[in-house]
Amino acid sequence: MKQIALYGKGSIGKSTVATHVAYALANQGHRVFLMGCDPMGDSTHNLLHKYTKPILDVLTEHDFEYEDIEVAEIVHRSPLPFENGGSVYCAEAGGPEPGVGCGGKGVIEAINTLKRLEVFDELQPDIVIYDILGDVVCGGFSQPIRDGFAEETYLVTSGELEALYQAVNVMGAVNRFAKRAGAKLGGLIVNLRGLEREEQIINDFAAKTDTRVLAVLPFSQLVKECGSEAKTVFEDHPDSTEAEKYSRLAEQVMASDYEPTTPHPMSFEELYEWWCPYVN
């Protein structure tokens, strides 16, 4: 079983990437488990066509008595038809009410619940995808890296300074836990935002931090329109360029022809001094 984590700045398109990669992998015949690790609980919406009750809410209803919880209460199989016998199972971590508690606690409790109920032993997924809020790399949100669940971390980013700043933050976490938990960086997945020389910015950033650019995804109105209907492009536009790009990305994620790296993150001062000449 392969386990990966997707991190990135809020609103960078991380969940869109996660759901499309999950769909593509299922179409390729894989059993996929998608774990939404955002308090919003919307990571799996495009695959379930509905919002599902987060694990933290289910735990609260059962007063954290794990033995009273059924797997079917927290894990939901996507009803969508996938080619080649594939499937996608979905779960959402959830989080506390705004202003109360720590969002990372939802991730910790959710992952511990999956372990206690032996969900992966029961479902036997080929790959687990953790879709994680990336703006704050606190203890809870870094758990997949810190505790060795995610063998590879992928950063969804753009050429914008804010997105790259978050990328170097996550790189720092990967670096910190490389020896302790074997954390590695699988590469960058780029959602272009229309900056001048943006691909050059990304390629240079990858070289400076010792990683690779896994995919470059241009802005797509089609993806936006499908997302507004809680769908991926695979459902209504399976022959689109967008579907082809996500299918290729999924193949690269599963491939074993690249050795993930321990990155060399920059400080914010270094990042700022390097980035500014591109846009000034």
Image: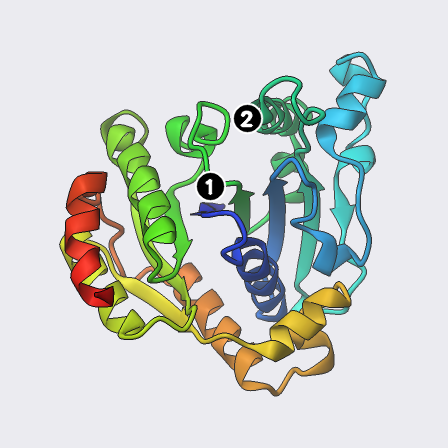
Q: Is residue 152 left or right of residue 50?
A: left
Q: Is residue 276 left or right of residue 51?
A: left
Quadrant in which residue 215 is drawn: bottom left
Q: In the rendered image of this protein, does residue 206 appear above or below residue 184? A: below
On the image, the x and y values in percent for residue 36 come to: 62, 43
Can residue 182 be seen at all in this image of the molecule? no
Q: In the rendered image of this protein, does residue 215 appear above or below residue 268? A: below
10 Å crowding of disc 1: few (<14), some (14-19), many (20+): many
Labels 2 & 1 near each other (Cβ < 8 A): no
- Please tell me whether mark 1 sits on a helix, a strand or a loop: loop
From the viewer's side, name the closer residue of 66 and 17: 17
Residue at image mark 2: 104
On the image, the x and y values in percent for residue 51 come to: 80, 47
Q: Quadrant of the C terminus?
A: bottom left
Quadrant in which residue 123 is drawn: top right
- For badge 2, the amino acid type reads Gly
**Pointer 2 or 1: first along the chain:** 2
From the viewer's side, name the closer residue of 112 and 273: 273
| Residue plotted at (59% across, 27% down) | 103
- For badge 1, the amino acid type reads Gly
Residue at image mark 1: 134
10 Å crowding of disc 2: few (<14), some (14-19), many (20+): many
Q: In the rendered image of this protein, does residue 248 appear above or below residue 111? A: below
What is the number of the mark on residue 262? none
| Residue plotted at (15% across, 50% down) | 273
- Please tell me whether mark 2 sits on a helix, a strand or a loop: helix
From the viewer's side, name the closer residue of 179 and 13: 13
On the image, the x and y values in percent for residue 27 come to: 62, 70
On the image, the x and y values in percent for residue 10 come to: 52, 47
| Residue plotted at (28% across, 43% down) | 168
Kindly report the distance in space between the C-alpha atoms of the residues bearing marks 2 and 1: 11 Å
Q: What is the image's colouring? A: rainbow
